[in-house]
Image: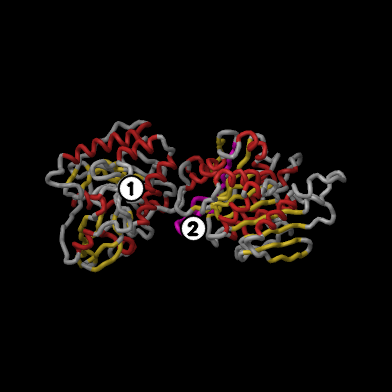
Amino acid sequence: MRLVVIFILWFPGLASLAGEDLTSLPDRATNAPTGGEFVRRITSADFAGRERQIYAEITAGNIPDFLRQFQPVTVTNISSGRTNVATFFVTPDYLAIGPNEDYFLTPMTPMTARRIADRLDCTLPTRKMVDAIYAAAEVRLAPVPIPPDAAMTTVPVFAQHNATVRTQRADFLKPHPLGALVAGHQKDLVITPMLADAPGKVAIYGWHQTNGVPIQPLYLKHAATWVDYSQCVRLVRQAMTVNGQPTTVAQVLADPRLAALLSDEGVITSPRYPTNALPPDAGEFKPTGQFGELICSFTFAPEVKILINSPALTNFTPDKPVLLVLYTLPNGNTTGQTIGRKPQPGDDWHFDIQHIGAQTRFLRELITNRTVVVAYLETEMKSWPAWRKKYGDALIPGIVEHVKNFFRTNNLEIALTSHSGGGSFIFGYLNAVGKIPDDVVRIAFLDSNYGYDSALAHDETLIRWLMPSDQHFLCVLAYDDAAALLNGKPFVSTNGGTWGRSHAMLKDFSGEFKFTSRTNDGLETYSTLDGRIEFLLKENPEHKIFHTIQVERNGFIQAMLSGTTNEGRGYEYFGERVYTNYILGD
């Protein structure tokens, strides 16, 4: 049992700090859903959709008025013979959605909690701070556990427990109105230095009984996506005081002389959850034994196979966005063939023509300010044009969102890339969404823009996406396939192949952008917007077929680096392979 000694003191000037509200939140809208309405809304939502709605409602100001006022908690310790007195400020109850009359204490993931805390210049408490909050609380409610079963992670059970707690709280409303500091009724999501060695986990602590002993010791066995009815989020304001002087929670936790005021686990240098984890199915990622990589594979109905290749979890750090590359496969290829490997006797030749896996490893060495993840998208019929003919375009945005949900973060970037018939997926996506989301930062066609059609407003959709942001890039790689011969005969029309489609794109884009052009060793380059739009078109006087050679000769690397400072660094497009050392042996 931990003995917590709390001295409640008061200093001049603290009243204004304690009374300061969550000023960056707007007022609650009159038509915002109540707690009960929000529960009904999210009951049928999927996990990712629920988390998005929680974040959206809270950041839109749909919280009870009483929750906006911080309450002070004062603690002391003795360090080097000096008594230190600190006051930090916390929300009087756990984060909730709805008005005072009908609010819903809202369980959520630490990723969503961290996004909200960052938005409001707040943090989550440590274990010691949770103890201090309980000791300082005006209202101490007894925990009411529900027998554990599979339903404990569902919204109806969340609502059931919320109703129980609201009934408990009602008994104290006369002496302690809403806004008084209340504790004991939920476990807390907490920060701890142990998170550094537990990537993808959530830290839970608290649920103090009436004797002051918490039911839940500090626990880090659950994945970060575990959310049950008993765990909620209390915000701690970053601004605090020590010995009457202003400071922040982060500064105190990082100071060896002061950290013990807020932490019984020593200094905490990174007092927040990582921005990037691998939820919601981190447990499904398995090590490959090669290059520290992790993979997760599954089928997405209807008839879509997805394999996600991730670097080691240590690559997911708060300072680096995740660059999630969706690579849609060429016609007739499996994911294994697309990833590539060193050819073995009797191997199908497709294993040695793309090597997207090896090119990705090369990219990870160059792109050090991003965590590069590649998701391979394959149809069971091995043809995206055939899949779209069967199912249409309406399902495609859902595929993209499903893959994105594996990396729930406020700092996620998407690249849509494709080879051959895989480009059909991208054009289907443009047809379905109309407006390309801002988190799509790159679109690249590796000899795959057959489906480009200005009659479907593809030019307008791409231009609207490219114009407002200097972080949006378009790369088109193609060759003169109209001049190519197969068994002595042409096999694509002048306008229907990627050569014709690329020149059609250039013509349509020229109405908005002024391109510069040059030709070097038979490679025509057209660029604009400081290289953010780049067309690399290979001439073909020898009538060869370069369809896969473009990819093999560092094509994927070029597609991902065009317009950046890394373009051409250590490689040459259409040059010799630079990724040989990254090719797997089997």
Residue assigned mark 1: 189
Expressed as whole percent of the image width and height from the top left, the position of residue 269 reads 37, 60
Q: Residue placed at 42% from the left, 37% from the top? A: 45
Expressed as whole percent of the image width and height from the top left, the position of residue 280 reads 46, 42
Seen in the picture, residue 256 relative to 300 is either above or below; the reply is below
Q: Is residue 490 magenta?
A: no
Quadrant occupied by the C terminus: top right
Q: Nearer the viewer, residue 568 or 527?
A: 527
Q: Residue placed at 74% from the left, 61% from the top? A: 524
**Mark number for residue 133?**
none
Do labels 1 and 2 touch, CB within 8 Å? no
Identity of the amino acid at label 2? Lys
Range shown magenta: 304-323
Q: Nearer the viewer, residue 329 or 583?
A: 329
Write down the quadrant of residue 96 in the picture: top left
**Mark number for residue 320?**
2
